[in-house]
Image (cartoon, helix red, strand yellow):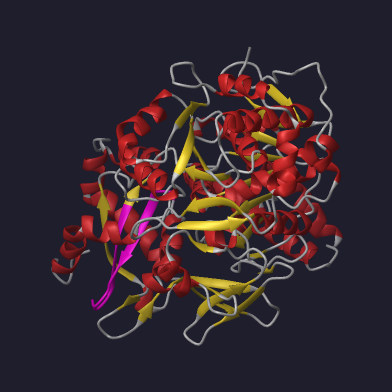
Amino acid sequence: MSTLTPISRGLSPEPPSTAAREPQTLGAMILKAAATHDGTALEYNIGGPVARITYRELGTIATEIARGLIALGIEPGDRVAILGLTSAEWTLADCGAMCAAAVVTPIYHTNSPEECAYVLAHSETRLVFCENADQAAKVALVRDRCPALEHVVLLSGEDGELTLGELRRRGQEIPPEAVEDRLQAQSADDLATLVYTSGTTGPPKGCMLSHANFLATTRLYAQQLHFNDTHSMYQFLPLAHVLARVAQAVTLSVGARLIYWSGDASKIPDELSRTAPTHFPAVPRIYEKMHGVVMGRIAESPPVQRRLFNWAVSVGAGARSAVRAGRLPDVLTDLQYRLAERLVLSKIKGVFGPQLQLAMVGAAPVARELLEFFDACGVLVLEGYGLTETCAAATVNTPEAVRFGTVGKPLPGTEVRIAEDGEILIRGPEVFMGYYKDPEATAEALSSDGWLLTGDLGHIDADGFVAVTGRKKDLIITSSGKNITPVNIESLLRESRYVTEAVVYGDDRPYLVAMLTLDREESVKLAERLGIATDPVTIAEDPAVHAEVQKEVDAVNAKLARIEQVKRFALLGHELSQADGELTPTLKVKRSVVYVKYADVFADLYERPEDSR
């Protein structure tokens, strides 16, 4: 029997009575959805035929897991961690823990044993769900440093002290009413989840998010994006990140379908085509990669195809902008758009699957030009803004109110203002309870009247759209005293089909420089065209490659003020990685780590002769 099959299949248990009330907690929300909706809740494929779990089955399995946790002695408010890659099992463990009134503590599957030890010990976790034996092995290495940890449960596989199936079977000794009793005793203001920031500097902090925080965010996103039970969400972002958890909660709250990726990034386009989701949330790097692939193919096309592509994108941009502004296109414009859509634009939109209604982007800055490009092709990518401390939500562009280059307007009930020094301040129902065991950090982040000091810089335009211009701690101050925000420059550089990552540097220096990493596939094509060896180090060091990348840098510089231009750059012979501590799980650069680790690379750029690139 599959560990995802309800043990009580065929018994058709009556849903707990809490499902009939307006949910005040995440556990109650899950059981209400299970009692209300009849369709598919979870859809996944792990190498065999497509499998589906209905909402009724979701409620049954979540309740069985909750009863198993109760049987093991997990009390309301106890920490239950989940360590693993995004999967249906992850979601089921999350739902089960919530139904047991436990506090879920996610851990990134990429975390090292040391990082796992910190979260497990600091949160005082009593039980951890591990994706498989490999993840359980990490925990085994550091278990002696986690005094509160009593149980390790495998989500998949049988080689462990306790499997998910065994946990659920143990729960048979606990009456179903025990779950209802726990949920009725919970309050909306109780702690729901303890999310440790991936952090670009220093040790992670445990953000305390209440059920009220999470449910407010869930409700507001569903309302603003008109999400309902006819929709489906493709889920591949790490569920340890609060944005993915919110996407999951929004989907389940309305009875929509969650579609899980197979775990193979190279198969995402094929899976989008096969599963046909209506909604696709991702981080900027995914859209940058898709854009780079498209532009790389176009660059290698014959001149006639390149001209056709440019014409089609231009027509698409004009048509989409006119429709959004409420202007009906004339007959000629309409014909041109239909032709452009048929010949070019539909092929690009098709990469996201045949049923896509809108895509979403968050967790890091994204270039305006990138959003405008996809919009011209018929893919509306809505950018929003939030932090772990705001349950991933604060502002969002909506289908009715889109302004590229901004992160949208504040969500209903949310206040956003700009401090005198340009810092963005947020107050609203999604703002967190504080940092676990860190009152000093909490006092620094939350004002006495409830305003969150985000650490981000930005401004609000006359129509109420918020723009984020960078992080206060990331500001570069040149030797001439100019303040420069590097993230926007880096976003523009990453639009190049050759560049996967860009790190701009220039504190106390007369001008800016950058370290760039190369896209493996595109750089190999370039090397073959130039007739040089295709190993990464040779490509990065070859002058002809530098000359090609220089053209890309020059194009970016043309869009920037002189003080913001990158005068020199270095190419790294490998990509930055999470494993080496250079990227967060959401692929943001840990700037302080990279500055220290590659200090000699940046220093060398300033030591070159004046006429050297």
Q: Residue at x 55, y 79 (%)?
A: 448
Establish if 271 lies above or below 487.
above
The image position of residue 591, as x and y in percent, is: 33, 60
Secondary structure mostly seen in magenta is strand
Please tell me whether residue 526 is drawn above or below residue 224 in the rendered image. above
Q: Residue at x 45, y 62 (%)?
A: 492
- Whether 302 is drawn above or below 480: the answer is above
Q: Position of 325 compared to 134: left or right? A: right
Q: Tell me: 155 left or right of 274.
A: left
Q: Residue at x 49, y 27 (%)?
A: 153
Residue 257 makes an appearance in the image: no
Q: Nearer the viewer, residue 419 or 275?
A: 419
In the displayed structure image, the side of residue 197 where residue 112 appears, left or right: left
The question of residue 264 being in magenta is answered with no
Q: Residue at x 26, y 61 (%)?
A: 595
Task: Please give the range of residues in magenta.
Answer: 497-516
Residue 263 lies, in percent from the top left, at: 51, 30
Asked whether residue 450 is in view, the answer is yes
- Give the quarter of the figure containing the C terminus: bottom left
**Residue 449, position in %: x, y?**
59, 80
Foreground: 435 or 73? 73
